[in-house]
Image (cartoon, rainbow, N blue to C red):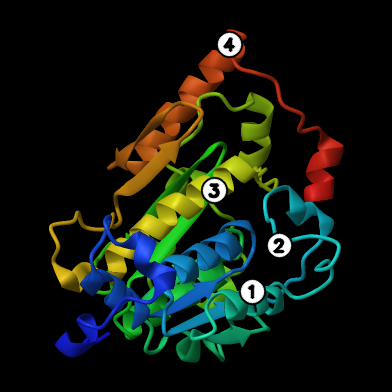
Amino acid sequence: MNVSSSTRHEAIPPEYRRNLGFWRRSEQELMRESVIAVAGAGGDGFDLAMAIVMMAGPKEIRIADPETFVPENSNRVAWAHTDTYQRLKVDVLREDITKIRPGTNVVTFRDGVTIDNVDQFVAGADLVLDESELRYLHVGTALARAARRHGVPNLLVMNIGFGAIATSFEPNSRHTFERMMGLPTDITLDEAATRTVNLARCVPYVPPYADLATFQAAMAGAPLPSVVQGVKAAVSLGATEAFLHLTRADQNRRRSPVFAPRWAYTDAMTLTSGRIRFARGRHWAGAAALAGRSLLGWNPRASYASEETRRRG
C-alpha cells in the first residue's frame, strides 16, 4: 500500500470529511489505497465489512462466503430481510458496497474460501479478516497459512454475549492460529476439518452474566447464541483494529493492534474493556465466576433448551 505525497495532499472527498478530526488525511488515504479480504459474511463479517467500507473506502475488498441469508440472521444483521432471504450473502454485500462506495472494486468468492482459491483471496491484500465460523478449523487454518505465506496480518473478531473479542496474527510471529487452537504445525486441512474447537483456547472472555446451561451447551459443541449488541460490539472493536492495521505506516502515535497471544475485549453489559494476556487462564477464571454466580442465583436465566440447541445446529 503506497501513497504518494501528492495524493496525500489532494482534497478529501465529502464521503470521508467527517472522519477528519479523529484521524488525519494521510491515514484516510492509506485506507483508501488498501485491499481488504474478508472471509465470512455472516453477522460479524457482513457488518464489519460494511463498516470498513464506510470508514475507509478501500481500493478493493474481497468477500468470501458460500451461504445464503435465512430468517435466523435477521436478529443481528440489518441486511437480512424478506428481500434477501435465500440470496447469497456475498451478492447482497457486493450490491450494498457498490451503492455506498462505487469506487471500491468488490471481488466475490461465492464458494467461500477453499484450498484452491485461498492464495488468490489473500495475495496482495493489506489485511485479512477471518470471520469464518470457528467450527470450520480447516478454513481458519488455510487462511492463516496463506496470510503467513503472503506476509499479511490476519485479524480475528468474534461477538460474545453483549461484547466482543479480537486478536491478530503477525505473519512472522510464533503465535500462530494453529498454536492458539492447539493444532499441530503440520496438520493437514482434512485432519483439521475433523477437529473440535476447544473454546478455552479461543474464547478468553466469558461473560460473567451468562446462563450456566448456555455455557455448558456451548462447551459441549452447541452453536453459540448471538445477539445484535454483541455483533455491534464486534464491529466497533474489529473496525478499530482494522484501522490500526491499515494506518500503521503513518506512524501517528497510535497504539499497535492487539496481537496474539494477547486479546482485546469489550462488554457493554459489564461496562468493561481491556487486554487479556493469558487466554486459557482468563477463560477458566471467567467460567468459574459464571458458575459461582449461577449457583448462587445471581445470574439471569436464559432459554437454551435442547430443542433450541438442535434447531440452531
What residue is disc 4 on? 298
Q: CA distance from mark 4 to mark 2?
A: 36 Å
Q: Residue furthest top?
A: 296
Tell me: 290 left or right of 89.
Answer: left
Element type at marker 4? loop
- Which amino acid, by three-letter code, is at mark 3? Lys
Q: Is residue 226 above or below residue 157?
A: above
Disc nearer the start of the sequence (3/1): 1
Q: CA distance from mark 1 to mark 4?
A: 44 Å
Element type at marker 1? helix
- Which amino acid, by three-letter code, is at mark 1? Asp
Q: Look at the numbered discs 1 and 2 and tell me whether their residues touch, using CB distance below 8 Å.
A: yes
Which residue is pictured at 25% across the width and 65% down the height? Answer: 174
Q: Look at the numbered discs 2 and 3 and tell me whether their residues touch, using CB distance below 8 Å.
A: no
What residue is disc 2 on? 79
What residue is disc 1 on? 96
Q: Look at the numbered discs 3 and 1 and tell me whether their residues touch, using CB distance below 8 Å.
A: no
- Which amino acid, by three-letter code, is at mark 4? Trp
Element type at marker 2? loop
Q: Is residue 175 above or below residue 5?
A: above
Q: Is residue 109 above or below residue 295?
A: below
What residue is disc 3 on? 232
Can you give x and y, in whole percent of width and height, for residue 293 in the image? 54, 15
